[in-house]
């Protein structure tokens, strides 16, 4: 596995510069049922296709950002800072 | 042996001798030689013994492609002598022959074992009786393999530099086509890297009379800004990443476009005796003569299938080699080298090829005959047989990158048919072999690669179009080639080697098909053809041709096997060598060394385990004072108007109501309610908190904090100051006096109470002093800028000298904390532990109005019965149980485990922590611990062993 991610701050870097934060898994807005809590904590979609996910530029600027990546071929379609920051 | 007269293209320096040893014997070569050329010049003809039959083998390709010249250099096996540059004093030894290279007893397998060593011999023979396999295995292990690796080779420990290079265009192969492509792309403005396995770029130009031209091209490429990597083979193509090995550096090259100009691999011919020393590929013979001024032989026979072999014949004549006979497999036609040979009075035998070579230990006699057997044989004495069986495009890397090949009947090889986007091919690999054509194809490929990245103008595009048309209009015709036919095994005496690496003969392929291994992939696995060090360079095409003959299929139907990385031999060390990894050391580390500390790894850190006597160090903390370097603690500054709110959301307890200059302990949990880390938090002012984490958790906590921050978008800044600040913990009954002597701060019990955090100068250094209960005695954790860490340490040691201060390490710290039942995250807890199980229910404030991470899971957990709980244990008989020992309450299956255990000299007994069934988690319960096959009784304790009410701590 080896590909390039574009950090919104630093530009394109090898994927090994980053920590993977997993697929985007929003925290429930209000108290979840036990079942909902279990799903939130332990279940992931694990799609074969485009996935929205978190990345952390560990060996760089230390920024968390979001990426859209095709899990089948590791093509990264988009990276952006969360909250619509440029 | 004398060298040939000087010529312009030679690589050797005749004025500098280089001395080395071969099997203990001193040999002399010249600067610029390879091991192979120097040994050949000294008269050596046998370079190795073959894998299975231990047949003598000599130089064949002189290009690092065939397996024939592999030797061990300075203890490292598997080095190709023909390309390894000669160094003064290097120790070269043969491999796979015993007792010596010239007399190898295992040769018996060749002389007598032929019929008994067919493919699958081991599996067929050594399977019965089955119980003898361990014995067989020992013997076979010894017989298998080529080289020997020393058990320990400290001098060969690799430190590999991994270099990442992003480029617009990568050109693989630095021959005429590759250089042209690199120049074209670079001159259009692209950032170009070119890698070549040879010590200088130029490829075939160098040994084939065009070295001046090669140097001009290389010069032009450098001037255009091309980064040229020499002695740097590309190893494979992975997801757009191409690793290129160059000495101690592994370049990980990522390029927008890749131009492959990998050339072609000259093929051997198949006939009995085709592996004898003295049988050489035409390229090998020419390289020996042109680059190293070594005559490959004195009387030569040349067997060719195209002009390449005839050109070699002319070059050998020019070098003074007598040409005894030339066989040209082509029946008719007239080409410039053919005419040149005729002009020189040599009449090649048309339609003929070599059908047998014989000689003891080296080639002495060659039989030439018309292909197919019709016509007269000619027997010729010689000491050199030059074979040129055509050129197979070196497509492996392209195939790994997604290209497709197909069989071309005209040229008799598998040629490129389809290239994926972003990949270009030029020169011989793309069937553009002739020099002018190769250069033009390189020019086109380089320009196209650059164009596709947006470089170049309309003129450049137009030029490419014109060139392409011109090349397509007949100029790019492949040279006339005759396709050698497969042999019929047994027709003539002697073994025909299809695969030199693994000693697979034409007959073995015949047998494997007879036994049912009739697809090329099955045959490959059964006979191991193409699986040796040459990676199919010398054998793949031959094997496919033989398979086609044996199965009656066409070559198209047979197809090729999959080419896998690495394409070029590479030491494991270059791939797996230890990277240059930084060890972290605190700013005080030098002092620990001077004090005789036993230093150990703790995560990335080098830390003092103890200073020789951990128990005495722990006692000093109780009796006088101790000081420990805790600079490794993670340290974060959390600042902003939302900082209190942010921490309230992250921790199960409250921080927004913490008063400035006060400290509170905190545990971080996940949303599943599991403990992740712990530490202390000091509020510095309304907007600023100073957060410490465990040493190993520093990075994780920083990521955790910033991740939630990225999601919540609060007005908070998190700054990791772990490396910027040093910290020491001063503890013990005399700690207060020692600290007071170094600061103006009121350190009295009333002025500086437990869990106060104050900023003050200590020994002139600005510090943050946290009064916390780290080790159970009155203690101060003093944080200061790293640059002053050593000064602070020295000042404390000096001021504490009269009070009996002692430094203490990690081990006594473990003991001191265990006495206080302080839970060590990751040691006493695991990824399933909750604050309830880990005896910290008080840390969870479920009544907190603020939602926090882990709240929902903890709400559920708080209402459920615990299964196991973390408690203290006391053992009476003095046995210190292993950490990890099993807890057995009533003899049935394990229900828990010991996580920490120590002998405490202060308490005069053995103490520990263990997970036990929740029903037993009360003072006075008895549990049984099973350790090292014995059972031990232990008593459960739920309050700290030392100072249970914290009176000492708070005093």
Image (tube, coloured by chain):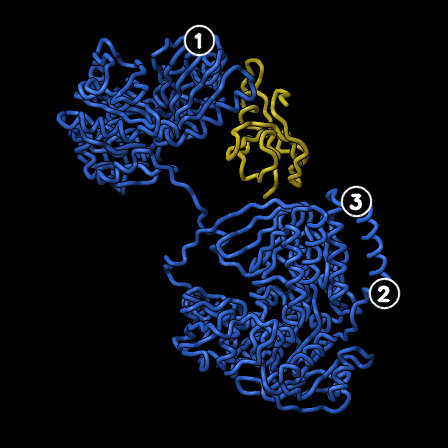
Chain colours: A yellow, B blue
Image location (x, y in percent) of residue B780:
26, 20
Quadrant of the rendered image containing residue B426: bottom right
Are discs 1 and 3 both within one chain?
Answer: yes
Image location (x, y in percent) of residue B182:
68, 54
Question: Residue at 67% of width from left, 82% of height from top?
Answer: B302
Q: Residue B828 or B260: which is nearer the viewer? A: B260
Secondary structure at numbered mark 3: loop
Q: How many marks?
A: 3
Secondary structure at numbered mark 2: helix
Please indicate whether residue B901 sits to the left or right of residue B786 in the image: left
Q: Are marks 1 and 2 in contact (CB under 8 Å)?
A: no
From where the camera sits, is residue B70 visible? no
Question: Residue at 28% of width from left, 17% of height from top?
Answer: B771
- Where is mark 1, residue-wise? B847
- Where is mark 3, residue-wise? B457
Considering only vertical position in the picture, is B762 above or below B896?
Answer: above
- Where is mark 2, residue-wise? B474
Q: Nearer the viewer, mark 1 or mark 2?
A: 2
Secondary structure at numbered mark 1: loop
CA gap, disc 1 and disc 2: 87 Å
Q: Decide: few, some or many residues near mark 2? Use Cα within 10 Å; few <14, some 14-19, many ≥20.
A: few
Question: Residue at 54% of width from left, 61% of height from top?
Answer: B569
Which disc is residue B23 wearing?
A: none
Residue at mark 1: chain: B
Q: Nearer the viewer, mark 3 or mark 2?
A: 3
CA gap, disc 3 and disc 2: 28 Å
Q: N-terminal of the two: label 3 or label 2? A: 3
Q: N-terminal of the two: label 1 or label 3? A: 3
Considering only vertical position in the picture, is B174 above or below B953?
Answer: below
Q: Decide: few, some or many residues near mark 1? Use Cα within 10 Å; few <14, some 14-19, many ≥20.
A: few
Residue at mark 3: chain: B
From where the camera sits, is residue B472 visible? yes
């Amino acid at each position: 596995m080896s590909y390039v991610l574009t950090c919104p701050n630093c530009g394109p870097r090898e994927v090994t510069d980053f920590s993977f934060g997993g697929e985007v898994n929003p925290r429930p807005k209000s108290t979840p049922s036990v079942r909902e809590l279990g799903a939130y904590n332990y279940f992931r979609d694990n799609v074969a296709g485009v996935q929205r996910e978190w990345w952390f530029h560990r060996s760089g600027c230390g920024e968390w950002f979001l990426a859209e990546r095709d899990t089948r071929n590791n093509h990264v379609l988009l990276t952006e800072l969360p909250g619509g920051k440029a | 042996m004398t060298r040939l007269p000087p010529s312009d293209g030679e690589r050797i320096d005749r004025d500098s001798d280089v001395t080395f040893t071969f099997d203990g014997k001193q040999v002399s070569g010249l600067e610029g030689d390879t091991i192979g050329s120097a040994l050949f010049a000294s008269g050596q003809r046998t370079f190795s013994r073959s894998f299975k039959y231990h047949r003598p083998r000599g130089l064949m390709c002189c290009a690092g492609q065939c397996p024939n010249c592999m030797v061990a250099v300075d203890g490292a096996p598997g080095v190709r002598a023909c390309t390894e540059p000669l160094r003064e004093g290097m120790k070269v030894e043969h491999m796979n022959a015993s007792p010596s290279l010239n007399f190898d007893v295992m040769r018996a397998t060749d002389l007598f074992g032929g019929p008994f060593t067919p493919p699958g011999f081991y599996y067929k023979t050594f399977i019965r009786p089955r119980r003898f396999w361990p014995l067989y295995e020992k013997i076979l292990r010894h017989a298998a393999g080529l080289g020997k690796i020393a058990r320990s080779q400290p001098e060969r420990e690799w430190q590999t530099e991994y270099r990442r290079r992003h480029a617009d265009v990568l050109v693989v192969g630095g021959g005429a086509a590759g250089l042209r492509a690199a120049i074209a792309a670079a001159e259009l403005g692209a950032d170009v890297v070119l890698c070549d396995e040879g010590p200088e770029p130029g490829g075939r130009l160098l040994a084939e009379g065009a070295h001046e031209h090669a140097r001009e091209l290389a010069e032009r490429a450098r001037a255009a800004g091309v980064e040229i990597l020499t002695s740097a083979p590309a190893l494979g193509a992975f997801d757009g990443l191409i690793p290129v090995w160059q000495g101690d550096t592994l370049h990980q090259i990522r390029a927008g476009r890749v131009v492959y100009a990998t050339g072609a691999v000259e093929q051997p011919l198949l006939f009995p005796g085709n592996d004898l020393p003295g049988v050489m590929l035409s390229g090998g013979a020419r390289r020996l003569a042109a680059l190293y001024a070594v005559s490959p032989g004195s009387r030569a026979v040349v067997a060719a299938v195209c002009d390449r072999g005839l050109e070699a014949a002319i070059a050998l004549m020019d070098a003074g080699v007598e040409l005894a006979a030339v066989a040209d497999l082509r029946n008719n036609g007239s080409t410039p080298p053919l005419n040149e040979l005729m002009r020189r009075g040599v009449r090649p035998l048309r339609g003929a090829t070599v059908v047998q070579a014989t000689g003891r230990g080296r080639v002495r006699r060659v039989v030439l005959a018309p292909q197919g057997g019709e016509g007269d044989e000619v027997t010729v004495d010689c000491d050199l047989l030059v074979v040129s069986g055509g050129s197979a495009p070196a497509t492996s890397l392209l195939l790994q990158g997604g290209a497709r090949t197909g069989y071309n009947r005209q040229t008799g090889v598998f040629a490129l048919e389809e290239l994926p986007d972003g990949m270009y091919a030029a020169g011989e690999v793309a069937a553009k072999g002739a020099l002018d054509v190769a250069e033009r194809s390189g020019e086109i490929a380089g320009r196209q690669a650059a164009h596709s990245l947006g470089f170049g103008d309309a003129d450049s595009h137009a030029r490419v179009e014109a060139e392409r048309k011109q090349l397509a209009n007949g100029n790019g015709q492949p040279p006339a080639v005759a396709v050698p036919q497969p042999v019929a095994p047994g027709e003539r005496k002697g073994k025909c080697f299809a695969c030199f690496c693994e000693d697979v003969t034409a007959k073995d392929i015949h047998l494997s098909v007879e036994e049912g291994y009739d697809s090329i992939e099955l045959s490959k696995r059964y006979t191991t053809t193409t699986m040796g060090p040459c990676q199919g360079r010398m054998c793949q095409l031959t094997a496919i041709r033989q398979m086609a003959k044996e199965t009656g299929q066409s070559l198209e139907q047979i197809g090729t096997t999959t080419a896998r990385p690495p394409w070029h031999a590479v030491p494991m060390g270059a791939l797996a060598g230890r990277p240059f990894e930084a060890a972290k050391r605190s700013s005080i580390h030098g002092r620990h060394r001077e004090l005789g500390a036993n230093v150990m790894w703790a995560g990335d850190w080098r830390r003092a385990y103890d200073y020789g006597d951990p128990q005495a160090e722990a006692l000093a903390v109780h009796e006088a004072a101790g000081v420990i370097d805790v600079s490794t603690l993670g340290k974060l500054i959390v600042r902003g108007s939302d900082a209190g709110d942010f921490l309230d959301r992250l921790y199960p307890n409250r921080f927004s109501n913490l008063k400035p200059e006060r400290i509170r302990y905190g545990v971080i949990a996940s949303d599943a309610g599991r403990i992740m880390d712990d530490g202390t938090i000091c509020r510095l002012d309304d907007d600023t908190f100073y957060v410490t984490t465990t040493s190993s958790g520093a990075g994780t906590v920083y990521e955790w904090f910033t991740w939630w921050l990225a999601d919540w978008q609060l007005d908070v800044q998190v700054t990791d100051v772990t490396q910027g600040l040093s910290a020491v913990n001063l503890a013990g009954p005399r700690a207060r006096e020692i600290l007071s002597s170094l600061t103006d701060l009121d350190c009295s019990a009333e002025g500086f109470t437990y869990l106060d955090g104050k900023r003050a100068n200590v020994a002139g250094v600005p510090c943050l002093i946290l009064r916390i209960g780290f080790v159970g005695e009155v203690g101060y954790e003093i944080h200061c800028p790293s640059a002053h860490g050593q000064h602070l340490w020295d000042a404390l040691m000096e001021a504490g000298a009269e009070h009996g201060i002692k430094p203490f390490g990690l081990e006594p710290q473990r003991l001191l904390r265990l006495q206080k039942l302080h839970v060590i995250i990751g040691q006493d807890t695991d990824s399933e532990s909750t604050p309830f199980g880990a005896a910290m229910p008080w840390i969870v404030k479920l009544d907190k109005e603020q939602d926090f991470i882990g709240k929902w899971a903890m709400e559920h957990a708080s209402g459920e019965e615990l299964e196991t709980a973390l408690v203290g244990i006391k053992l009476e008989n003095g046995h210190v149980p292993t950490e990890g020992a099993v807890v057995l309450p009533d003899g049935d299956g394990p229900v828990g485990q010991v996580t920490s255990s120590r002998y405490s000299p202060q308490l005069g007994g053995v103490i520990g922590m263990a997970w036990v069934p929740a029903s037993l988690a009360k003072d006075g319960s008895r549990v049984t611990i099973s350790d090292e096959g014995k059972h031990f009784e232990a008593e459960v304790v739920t309050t700290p062993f030392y100072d249970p009410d914290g009176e000492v701590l708070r005093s």
